[in-house]
Amino acid sequence: MNTTVKHTEFNIDTIREDFPILNRKVNGKPLVYFDNAATSQTPKQVIDVIVDYYSNYNANIHRGVHTLSQEATDLYEAARLKIQQHFNAKHSYEIILTSGTTHGINLIANGFTNLLEKGDEVLVSALEHHSNIVPWQMLCERSGAILKVIPMNEKGELIIRDYDALLSKRTKLVFVNHISNALGTINPIEDMIKKAHQVGAAVLVDGAQSSPHIKPDVQALDVDFYVASAHKMCGPTGVGLLYGKEKWLNKLPPYQGGGEMIDQVTFEKTTYAGLPHKFEAGTPNICGGIAFGAAIDYMNAIGFDAIATYEHELLDYATAQLSAIEGLKIYGTADEKTSVVSFNIEGIHPYDIGAILDKLGIAVRTGHHCAQPIMDFFKIPGTVRASFAFYNTKAEIDALVEGVKKAKMMLS
Ligand SMILES: *Cc1c(COP(=O)(O)O)cnc(C)c1O
């Protein structure tokens, strides 16, 4: 199975050829795909791996003595090693394959139920996705712990002075995303992790938005838990990773019971399998895991430094072009941000702009972006969000800018 790509230099034309979907038309216009923060597109190198899997290797893993099962198991475990290397986990068994970011967060939130006591405090940032808010609220209801919020400022940056003041001996857990999906803010997680550890709190970083743009090093960060989804980094939906430090994963109870996660089962007592299988009950997304590994190979072949540089050019270009439109306001102006532009035009509902852009073949997100508290902060119902990936172009941004001008004319 050949998952290697030849990308010796960053050439946008050859990169675009890797993505079949970029050739399609929407409403008679060439597709301009600017909803990358919701899900990324899939290169043919990853699609080929999926086709190859179902054509040649499809079998259940870790169970059969037969050849197909062994081949599928080898490919799946090889993908785990790729994920381990990419995120630089110390051990491969610290990588739990999940169905995505949401699953990983719920697994940890569930595991902490009996590790927290009434009056313990957990901190969550004001910039979170609902999937990094609601599971912690549920955890607090179960355990009697108190949820406190790290506030943000008008630029969409966390107020670190306030974070410092919130930290105390009562703080047991801190949840923060590396990058906000709604605003693109890059949070100072190194500093936040260090400070949390000084009071003995563990930190979970939601890497759903950072993993497509930055190659994280979980050991250098010294982060306790890190979660991400494959579908935001050129992989398929329904698969993701949970990294946890070995000492934490050993301390946490299993999340779901079932096949694969057991050592011995009798009706009197069941003993659990070791890591990572303790947290991987049932048949996993085998093909998805293998394709996740291929997506990581693909992105590394392009190169994360080249990706970051190019996407920053797109961000600066789009910010300048869009800001020049009268009445347009950009939300999220943090000094450190990735290629997300969230905006509104005075007096126009974001949904109406999105609908007109769709008629022009331009895919953007409108609404609260699963981050209602951020919208409440700015006292708006939602925004139009254009999020760029390394396969987008300045010409596509020009089309967006023209489309927004047209929408403004039609709607005001
Ligand atoms: C997309 C996203 C999630 C949820 O990811 P799923 O793949 O839907 O589980 C969580 N947090 C952030 C910051 C996201 O962008």
Image (cartoon, rainbow, N blue to C red):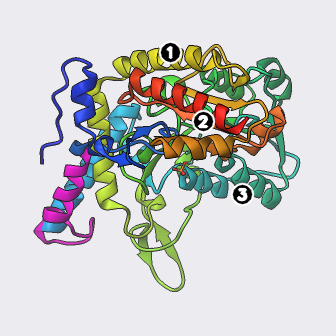
Would you place residue 241 above or below residue 113 in this image?
A: above
Q: Is residue 123 visible?
A: no
Q: Measure the C-alpha gap from mark 3 to mark 1.
A: 46 Å
What residue is disc 1 on? 317
What residue is disc 3 on? 113
Name the one closer to the observer, 222 or 396: 396
Badge 2 vs badge 1, beta-carbon distance below 8 Å: no
* Residue 60 colored in magenta in the image: yes
Q: Residue at x 37, y 17 (%)?
A: 305
Please state, as top left, top right, bottom left or bottom right, where the C terminus lies in the image. Answer: top right
Q: Earlier in the sequence, mark 2 or mark 1?
A: 1
Q: Amino acid at mark 3?
A: Thr
Q: Measure the C-alpha gap from mark 2 to mark 1.
A: 15 Å
Q: Quadrant of residue 334?
A: top right
Q: Which residues are magenta?
A: 46-67
In the image, residue 43 lies at what x, y percent?
A: 28, 42
Name the one closer to the observer, 217 or 317: 317
Q: Amino acid at mark 2?
A: Arg
Badge 3 vs badge 2, beta-carbon distance below 8 Å: no
Q: Quadrant of residue 81?
A: top left
Name the one closer to the observer, 12 or 263: 12
What residue is disc 2 on? 385
Q: Amino acid at mark 1?
A: Tyr
* Disc 2: residue Cβ within 8 A of ligand 1's nearest atom: no
